[in-house]
Amino acid sequence: MSFRLRIDLRNASTHRLNISLEADKGQSLPTELAFPVWTPGSYMVRDYSRHITRLSSGKKVSKNVWSIPAGTKRVSYEVYCFERTVRTNYCDENYCSLVGAALAPVLAGPLSIELLLPKDWSMVSSALNFRKAGPGKFQAKARDIDHWIDCPIIASRKSHGGKTSFTLSGIPHEIAWVGSPPERSLTEMKEAFRKISSTTLKFFGGAPFKKYWFLLHFGSGLYGGLEHRDSQLSQFDGSSLANQKMWDGFLRLIAHEYFHSWNVKSLRPKALGPFDYFQENYTEEIWLAEGLTDYFDDYISWKSGLCTEKNYWESRLKDINLMPDGFPGHIRRSLAESSFDAWIRHYRPDEDTVNTDVSYYIKGGLLGWCWDGNLRRLTKGKWTLAKLFAEFWKEIGVDAYVSLATATPGYTRAQLLSFAKEKTGVDHGFLEKWVSQRSTLPWQQAIKDFQLKTTERISDPTLHFLGLQLNWKERSGSISKVIAGSAGESAALAVNDEIIALNGTRVQDGEKFSLCLQQARKNGAPLELTVCRGDQLSTKRLRWRAHRGLGLEIVLL
Ligand SMILES: [Zn+2]
């Protein structure tokens, strides 16, 4: 079976696309059209079908499935596209950013795709490699549904998009953007992306793709990226790019998504391909897919000459400071458990996340550093994690151009760790413990392994002495986090309690609160915190103390 998908954006200003899906000559559509509920790389059920309406001759049988009469050759439907994220669709009168999982049902067979754009839109970019077939008409083919879902599309009129390209080791790289014009030239981007690409290609000693597309969506307040086999869709606030720190962050995002073409699209956990697009796909290995990519995106930026060595080590310490040992999430959830529960936790953090979960990005990145240090120490510098990772890819990486349905299955953790032992001679039992046990990581050893000189200082006295995090706005403050087992929790304080007074003094800003806290500390006086919950005032007595691993910062000397 093969299908024709026509996406009509000629009324893009209404944020609605008209889609027509047709079976090829002599064939009929399947009697059930089932739409994906998530997109690979973003591990949450998003129920895309909530944006689909007016599906002709269809009767709904479940949240994402329409039944259509047997023998139907063609259906049409409308998709509302007004969510500016890398996993959802957006279109307006100037440009669009489209994601396959949110546009078409899962079909067994190749697809011919036709884009109908407003006539003055001339820029289209996608790893589907569209060719122009007339004014406002572009055509491409997708080998199968996985290919279609793995290839986001951006398109625009001239004023809201642009393109450039470079070739590296014979591999063409296309850079295309849509949205608001960024505050950095395409030439500057090209130079920086070329450095990132060159370093990453050298890192692995080869590429899992034959051509690569950097697809960029710029707009106020945007941030995010999603990896694909041979492209990435990344969003950023383009107006902030003149600022060096934001530019550095943008390049790390680009390096991160590029690195994913190796780590997760090719070197992929067994559960992540072939995909079940209709439900959660559980795996305990997202710490490796995301955490290790986080560890190496900084490394690639540094080795590409895009950040200083000092910046690099500061990034390493940032992971310790963002996910300090005092966060009780460490003793309630392992990295494996956090990966498994990504579907219901990572994208839905709440006030208690700090007590019950660990970030597989931040803690996974820290694990990468500890792993690297261990490997260097135990092999006396013969092995680094970068070298081992390149070997992982060469040996265990799957050819990303082979259809997912017939490709070699992805790795299991046991397979990866036994390969690591065989290659380096180091028993990787330590890693199994770091991943599966509910405990903190030995980052103090990593500081020694990399011979860094650091010191510890109190960065947040309220968190350090009370186990509370406060949020101050204009002349009012409230509790935003209560650390489990802390002085604050023992005093029966709760998230959202409004701060009224400390030891009888009215406090309305963070500075005054810190001063009162300092004063009380100096006098050794107990603390009385008056808060308002709902419409009830109460005064809580706090037996305050220093909390290990909370409100502290490790900095380079
Ligand atoms: Zn990632």
Image (tube, rainbow, N blue to C red):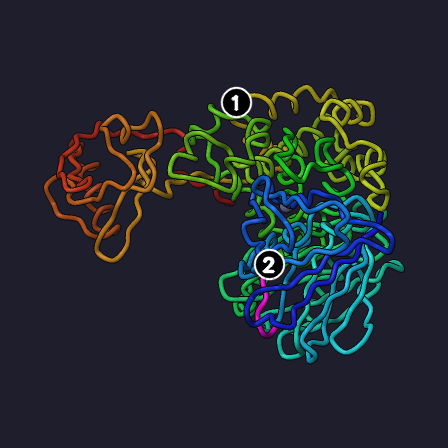
Across and down, in percent, residue 189 comes to 68, 67
Point out the quarter of the image occupied by ligand 1.
Answer: top right
Q: Is residue 363 left or right of residue 4?
A: left
Please provide the residue range marked out in magenta.
89-94
Across and down, in percent, residue 117 comes to 69, 72
Q: Mark 1: which secondary structure? A: loop
Task: Return the residue at label 2.
Answer: 79
Other-residue count near label 2 (Cα within 10 Å), few / some / many at <14 / 14–19 / ≥20: many
- Residue at position x 51%, y 23% from top? 439
Task: Return the residue at label 1.
Answer: 438
- Residue at position x 82%, y 47% from top? 109
Across and down, in percent, residue 436 comes to 60, 22
- Residue at position x 19%, y 41% from top? 534
Examine the rendered structure and indicate whether residue 408 appears above or below residue 175: above
Looking at this view, is 266 or 15 the one in front? 15
Across and down, in percent, residue 176 comes to 70, 67
